Image (tube, helix red, strand yellow):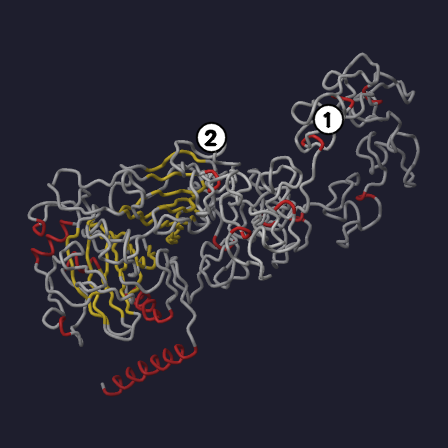
Amino acid sequence: MMKLKSLIAGLSLLGMFYNAHAAIGSLDTVPAATLLAPYFEVDTSTTNGLRSQFTVSNASNTEQVARVTLWSDRGVPVFGFDIRLDGNGTVEVNLRDLLVNGTLPASTAGGVGSCTGVLPYAALSATTTLGLRNALSGQASSLLGGQCASDTQGSARGFVTIDAANTCTASNTVFPTSVGYFADGGLGLASNNNVLFGEYAFINSGSGNAYGDALVSIEAGVASGDTFYGLMAGNGAANNREPLPNMYSARISNIPGTVPNSINRTAAIVWRDPGLAAPFACGTSGPQIPDGIGTIFDHEEQPTGTFVNANTLSRATQYLAQIGSVVSGNVVYDFRTTGIPKRQGFASHIAYTNGFDGGNSAEASMYPATAFDDSAGSPGAIFPFGACSDGLDNDGDGLVDFPADAGCFNANSNSENPACSDGLDNDLDGQTDFPADTSCASRFQEFEVTECSDGFDNDGNMFTDFPADPNCRTAADNSEFTNNNQCSDGFDNNANGLIDFPFDPLCNFPGDPTESSAACLDGFDNDTDGLVDFPADPGCTSVTDFSETAEACSDGLDNDSDGQTDFPNDRGCTSPNDNNEINPACIDGIDNDGDSLIDFPNDPGCSSSTDDAENFGPCDDGFDNDGDMLIDFPADPGCASAASTTERPQCNDTFDNDFDGLIDFPNDPQCASASQNSEEGQQCNDGIDNDGDGLTDFPASPNCASATDPSEQPECSDGIDNDNDGLADFTGVGIVFPADPGCSSATDGSEFASATLAACSDGQDNDGDGFIDYPADPGCGGAGDTNEFAANQVNGGLGHPIPAASPISLLVLVLSLMGIAGLALYRRQSA
């Protein structure tokens, strides 16, 4: 216990290095006027059960008062108390001490006059302690006039808010819902001082688990509109606190516990805005929060339905022991409710690791879910799925994703209701949507304002927008700079009615210099057959076909006079695009080489039915073609069969073809036999450190799934679509594959959108120290290590590495430690 207290105190001591960059309306860890501990749980029946505690720290140099409120899991405020913080000071609150022993945190009045006579608190009476415990554990409480604040019996559960305050108050029943608690501008009991920060932790002595995270920072600085306490306290915007976001996403993993080194269960803490809740008659259900769902996606980014609903997430705070049954993927939390579309929430995930022995380890790492909108409902962090493939009806039209929603150009589109077809004049230029708005290149364009219509001289040439700026081709041109590529210049260069990438299929990417005119999309009858373009002209296979003239195997003629016309009727046609109907020698029914053997598979000179020659190959021609005194198959080991095309393949040619210092079979391990025609085998068994990470081949290299893996590179940078979803790598692969949203970085070891890899081989900087995976991260003992935290970092996945201290701060810390040591020595000598 002493070690844990020291750890938490140490975290708070280092608060002077806390992130000080604040952004109102976004979820950031900064000093704030309000802190939220989204969930607590205390087993009051045993000393070895689950307990919760938190620290509150002061980021300013002057004394501060903080008002702490305990809320039930139904959102009913039940008990309040004050703590005074020294300048840059910290106070620890142990909720088990409070709920079992009635012990409030040690805090004195200091130099705050209003706290004199209030602090320090005496221990609560046995009656008050019991009433508080009952209020949080689903029993009738004397603090609530015999009513209940929770319908969940057993352990005490709820959440905590901590507000910066102007004064102390002696009452334990003054809550954020009380009259006068908030006044606009921070002039009520609560202040608007953004100075508080802290940590919260869950400790289970019985199982040896301990994990936690930073308290949720809620800054003051909002003058109107939605606020954090707006619904909970019923005071509108007077509290001035920024609201939390209302949509979150997170990765999940439910790999069976028998799989070594995997995350075998993902839990979650979910807090929801309860609105203004009041005590209720015991034996009845508490206030319910309507709507709100969680949608789960599998590792192929396909929605598999909802895993939670209003019944599952009906409380203000809840702990979900396991999320759904999908093995791995993503989950989306949507806290918006009917009538209150911007209702706020918070979600934090806890991934339980599975040890090498096949049993659950004693560690659990907390991974906060990512908000993908801000408090105003605007897009925030990048979400793994675009709006047209996320399984959500983003524009509320009753249609979900491509191709069902007509607002989606394709599955990769980021809007179901793009600006150029939403019926609004978004740029206030008096023109609405495509084609009326000249800034819109198509109805699928997601913005009505471009560089050539935004009123700014973006390229600094003293000319602004189209038509004044000669570098602007049209108002829809999104670049005022010169050398515009035709596929991103906002102009229909090939006059096919489609403008730029991705709308014009003749543009392969935005940087494509030309919008070329394919014959099958140019509006002309190029082959003079009376039919124009695709799909009218059967000679066109697609709009990108550069010839309207049909190939021999799709022209309706019997070109080889064999009585068979076109594919699939003519055996000489391998496809409609085959331009030769003449039967290959190996399927023409003739003994072309006079060996009394006809066609494939009877004639060994035929490698397949499409082989155009029955002539003897080098492995069946009666000659020693490679001069090794061995003739043909099976005598010559360089021949894999009579149809082999060479008697001297790479694994039998006396050359070191792959420059690994090993020549031919059996010396080169890349050669499975003498007849193999390549010495270059799979990178994961070639004895070479191909990716330069200091680890060679399977199983040493964490990027090798097996010895036959062709690449040692991480999946998210190997140029391969590993999860077969049509997307590849972190940045995509040329024009062949768009980027895979399952990749969080180029070093991510899996394209699957899951969290199943060990922390030391998942391509992530899990502890935020700037080092990724083994062997780069000193906290990793090996590639299979499930924790990147080093000994000098927070253990158990507290979510934040110890920040780097400045030289002055380190000097102060060293001098402080020397002073403590000297004091201890003095006392010892005095004794």
Disc 1/disc 2 C-alpha distance (Å):
34 Å
Which disc is residue 525 wearing?
A: 1
Residue 705: percent from left, percent from top: 58, 45
Q: Earlier in the sequence, mark 1 or mark 2?
A: 2
Residue 780: percent from left, percent from top: 49, 60
Which image quarter is the N terminus in? Answer: bottom left
Callout 2 amino acid: Ala
Q: Nearer the viewer, residue 674 or 168?
A: 168
Residue 332: percent from left, percent from top: 39, 42
Disc 1 is placed on an element classified as loop
Instruction: Identify the residue at image location x=78%, y=45%.
Output: 665
In this picture, residue 591 sits left or right of residue 770: right
Instruction: Identify the residue at image location x=34%, y=47%.
Output: 246
User: From this viewpoint, is residue 727 visible?
Assistant: yes
Q: Residues within 10 Å of mark 2 (few under 14, many from 20)?
A: few
Which image quarter is the C terminus in? Answer: bottom left
**In the image, residue 367 above or below residue 614:** below
Q: Residues within 10 Å of mark 1 (few under 14, many from 20)?
A: some
Disc 2 is placed on an element classified as loop
Callout 1 amino acid: Asp
How many numbered discs sit on the rendered protein? 2
Residue 820: percent from left, percent from top: 31, 80
User: From this viewpoint, is residue 200 visible?
Assistant: no
Q: Nearer the viewer, residue 325 or 168?
A: 168
In this picture, residue 398 sits left or right of residue 315: right
Which disc is residue 404 wearing?
A: 2
Instruction: Identify the residue at image location x=53%, y=55%.
Output: 783
